[in-house]
Amino acid sequence: MEVSCRFVLVMQLGPRTLESAVSMLGQVAGCCGDKPPLLLSDNHLPYPAAILQVFGRVLHRRRHWRRGRLKLKGLKAPPGLMAGVVVKVRDAGGKLLKVKTKAIFGRLKDIRGKIKRLKLGNDINTAHVERFNGTARGRSARLARRTRDVSRRRTPLRAALGLLRDVYNFVHPHAALDGATPAMAIGLAEAPWSVRQYVDYPVHVADWQRMIWAEELENHTRSALDSPKARQLVPT
Amino acid sequence: MAREPVVTEELPLEHFACPNGECGMFNRFGAGNLSVAERMGKAKAIRRLYCNCCGRRFSERQGTLMRYTHLPAETVERVVKCLTYGNSIEATADICGVDPRSVGRILGQGGRRAEDFHRLQLHKLEKPPEVVEMDELHAKVARPPGKKGGRGAAGTRTTGTNALGTRAVTGVVRRVVTGFTWPWR
């Protein structure tokens, strides 16, 4: 979710694995160009590796004293990448004891400064996306807790989530945006859409567009270590 | 005898674009390449548009949620509203007075269209996102009713020991596979 506009960028459906995290971050990277955004998350373990795989650059390690085996290449965060996590400390019974924040990429001071500057709080938090999770649970019968309306297959669940995301982004005004919709805040719409407008909006996608999107996603999710080496131009 | 066209709120032609992927005017709204070729439907209320760039004709409902549906637009709108306000398929069908299969069809078609719509909108973004929050939301995909396990259930003819053994193995495998993540609370 893009926090300052409350725009839902990606809803990835799947298990909580590294592949899902990489796929989600690849889609985020596809719409943020060269400059990586400030990433805030909870302490889900695959996130740091996924961030490095999507945004990272090749780290060339040096040998000491020019002896020994060549060190393997690694991944490092690009300059300007900032990511912070919220860590919940619990006791053995699962009771919450403390909430800590830490920066996994970038300086903690810079992250806090950016959060304060954008008026998103005083510290690293995931409050906005957690609030959206509550909204999603309320607006989709498949996500409600202790319900018998759960999905039996993944396809309808994905369809319901897609419909929910679009209506949330374009139709429902947001109280934190002074009655504007997230799409208006991010510059995709000039006024709140009605559901009838959404239903009547023609969406045309060609096969070559899908192929381009798939290729873009593959490029974004490919690690810098696996990408083909760029050839240096030979001066003539 | 031809029926008289029903005068409804018709959208201007700038609202539409050519859906032919090989056309030069593909997905260009308000390019001035479209004209009304004929009217279709029982009440002659659906326009068939003509693209003077590629010479193809297409329905004005192509690419919308109204495509291939015989339901009135108000009903489809109500179905979408009900689905996005937390109603189940059965509840939506009951409220809107349609068949549950129609609701499922609108949901499936709307989901596929929503993916395309979202991708197209993301490509229109002018300013890149500044702050992105990520989180996980637990949802359950249950097994279809006919395939549920347990003793005496239809479709599973295993003995109690076997079923228990399978469950135990599944538990171990799940624990190993998801071992590097925190359990969901």
Image: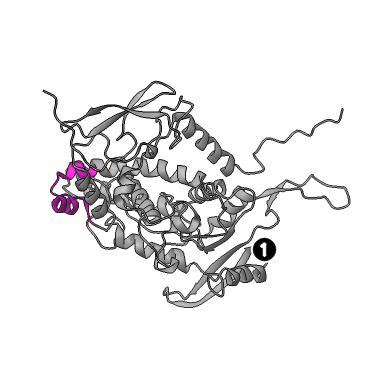
Locate residue A143, reporting x and y percent.
Answer: 31, 58
- Does the rendering let one see residue A222? yes
Q: Chain of mark 1?
A: A
Q: Amino acid at mark 1?
A: Gly
Query: In the picture provided, is A32 more to the left or to the right than A137?
Result: right
Crowdedness near tag 1: few (<14), some (14–19) or many (≥20) residues, C-alpha within 10 Å: some
Q: Residue at x 53, y 68 (%)?
A: A86
Is B102 included in the stretch rendered in magenta? yes
Nearer to the camera, A71 or A10: A10
Q: Which residues are magenta?
A: B87-104
Give residue B149's position: percent from left, percent from top. Answer: 23, 48
Can you say whether A153 is above or below A6 in the image? above
Residue found 16% across the figure and 47% down from its top: B152
Of A9 and B147, the residue lying toward us: A9
Q: Position of residue B135 (x, y in %)?
A: 46, 60
Quadrant assignment, res B69: top left
Q: Main secondary structure of the magenta part?
A: helix
Query: Residue under circle 1?
Result: A106
Q: Is residue B26 above or below residue A69?
A: above
- In the image, taking residue A175 as reference, residue A37 lies left or right, namely right
Q: Find the residue positioned furthest to the top.
A: B55
Residue B166 in the image, given as x and y percentages of width and height: 31, 48
- Name the residue nearer the viewer: A5 or B26: B26
Q: In the orientation shown, which residue stands out farthest toward the left?
A: B1
Secondary structure state at the residue bearing disc 1 = loop
* Nearest the eye: B165 or B12: B12
Q: Is residue B144 above or below residue A2?
A: above
Colour pattern of the rendering: one colour
